[in-house]
Image (spheres, grey):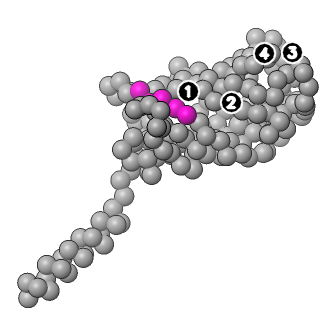
Amino acid sequence: MKKIFYPLLAGVLLISSAYVSITSQEWKIKDEFSIKFSSKDPSGIFKDFKGTINFDENDLASSKFDLSIDVSSISTGNGMMNKKAQIEEWFDASKYPQIKFVSTKITKSEKSDDGFIIVGNLKIKGAVKETKIPVIYSKSGDGAKFSGTFNVKRSDFKVGHKGDVVPDIMKIDFVVPVVKK
């Protein structure tokens, strides 16, 4: 009886453990976030950023980022430039009001103990491109911060037109403070 019972019990435990899923920590984005873009000209910020962040540095497979930026929240320090950014040639805000990023995979960075690479689909003006975003994850009490820098090639998303006036590569700097939900 014992010869059958223990292997059967081990099998049941193994199968049942396959159905247990560990959920990652859900984080709320704090209002003190910073999403900056810069080039030779223009430079500015986005004032409206939201989404869901489920992240556990020990359970990257269950971690997920689903983020959006309201295009109309662009601020370059120049009202005319802000309005121009909304037109069809640039972001076409009436048709594509949001910039979206949804992660597909998160891995540990080889460059830093607190670094991660978030791979996902960046959607701007209807075009989607797989994008790798390096982040530094800093914990502090019940809060944390995700920060980093990456580049976006605006021609990949048909934002604006080629020319010497506005560079094709835009540098994105971000700091996203979060608190446990």
Name the residue beneath numbered marker 4: 40
Which label sits on residue 148?
A: 1
Report the residue that reaches farthest toward the bottom: 1
Amino acid under disc 2:
Asn
Ranked by sequence position, the earlier of labels 4 and 3 is 4
In three-dimensional space, the C-alpha distance between marks 4 and 3, rounded to whole angstroms, equals: 18 Å
Name the residue beneath numbered marker 3: 80
The residue closer to the viewer here, 111 or 132, is: 111
Q: Is residue 24 left or right of residue 174?
A: left
* Secondary structure beneath label 2: strand
* Magenta region, residue range: 134-138
Amino acid under disc 4:
Lys
Q: Position of residue 11 (x, y in %)?
A: 24, 76
Q: Is residue 140 left or right of residue 53?
A: left
Amino acid under disc 1:
Gly
> Which residue is rendered at x = 60% and y = 26% of the image?
149
Amino acid under disc 3:
Met
Ranked by sequence position, the earlier of labels 2 and 4 is 4
Q: Position of residue 17 (x, y in %)?
A: 29, 65
> Which class describes the residues within 10 Å of circle 3: few (<14), some (14-19), or many (20+)?
few
* Secondary structure beneath label 4: loop
Name the residue beneath numbered marker 2: 151
